[in-house]
Amino acid sequence: MPERVLKLFVAFVVSLGFFSPLALAKPSSGKEKSQSEISEILADRTLDKTVRFVINNTLYTLYHEVGHLLVDKQQWPVLGREEDVADNFATYILLTQKRRAFEQALKDAALGWRLEGEARGARTADDFYGEHSLDLQRAYQIVCMMVGEDRRTFAATAVEWGIDRRRQSGCKDDYEQISRSLEQLISPNRDKNSQAEVTINYERAGARLALAYKTLRESRLLESVADDIRNNYGLTVPVLITATVCDEPNAFYDSQSSEIIVCYELLDDYFDMINAHLEAGGGN
């Protein structure tokens, strides 16, 4: 099925209500992230696999940007690349939910980085001196943390990604170090009664990005992440989460405005990525 036709089909399915996470959403119960709206949405087994992939990768990206927010506003120490800290934070938060739906979110995020790397093609010098690890390294880091957190549960995932037994043992050490470090930063603020002020702004997307807008709006990803930010990190500054048109598939954190920006083009890119992968016979 041609890519554009597939997108229109998904949009048609959405319009009929077969993908209607808004109907599943319940008010968040406060500080329990595992009870957030998104956990119920991801647990819906009838959710279209392309939509699930897009939601999962966007969820991971959102928590990556939350990592930048916390490094900035909570003055978290950074030893190495800040981008790696943000990736590890996103992976850790999803892993600690202890639910299969979030485990699948991490598998999809790893696949997303692998597909991104394949699409990028030949590397140039700026890929090696840039602020980010290589796409495939980011994918393997997610998998390594999963294996390190629970080697038995993710044994098949380790084999699928070709991680040998010796490195699997090293992943356990890596995960223990990362989780211990993050808990020392997160735990002191987890039980505070104060709530951060978080505002969500959906800007217009236009017809070309209508599916991206609808997926983001009805999945309530921004609302779930906003609820987590309000309750669990001890932030005292107002935070803004904005969905907008950026003319590029990306997401950003703006330290001056304390704003997380999600581009509709990013979700559109995720749709293109997974559709091309499935059309080529890839699994999900």
Image (cartoon, rainbow, N blue to C red):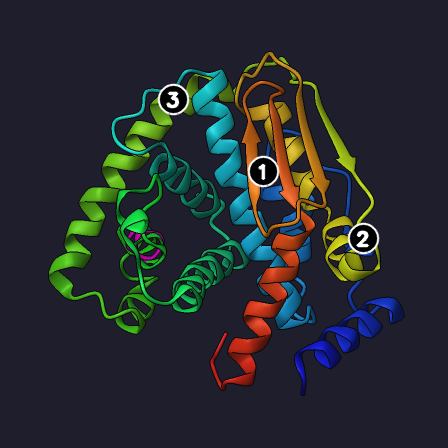
Q: Position of residue 118 (x, y in %)?
A: 39, 68
Mark 3 residue element: helix
Picture coordinates of residue 96, whole percent (x, y): 44, 43
Image quadrant where residue 267 sits? bottom right
Residue furthest toward the front? 125
Asked if the magenta segment contains residue 82, the reply would be: no
Q: Which residues are magenta?
A: 140-144
For label 2, the SS is: helix
Earlier sequence position, callout 3 versus callout 2: 2
Q: Is residue 36 visible?
A: no
Residue at 59% from the left image edge and 75% from the top image edge:
275
Asked whether, in this view, residue 89 is left or right of residue 203, the answer is left
Q: Which residue is denoted by mark 1 in the rendering?
A: 33
Q: Mark on residue 185?
A: 3
Tag 1: residue type? Lys
167 sits left or right of 207 in the view: left
Residue placed under numbered mark 2 in the picture: 22
Binning the other alpha carbons within 10 Å of mark 2 as few (below 14), some (14 to 19) or many (20 upward) gives some
Instruction: Name the residue: 77% across, 45% down.
Output: 26
Q: Residue furthest right?
A: 16
Q: Residue at x 60, y 61 (%)?
A: 269
On the image, the x and y values in percent for residue 30 come to: 67, 30
The amino acid type found where label 3 is placed reads Leu
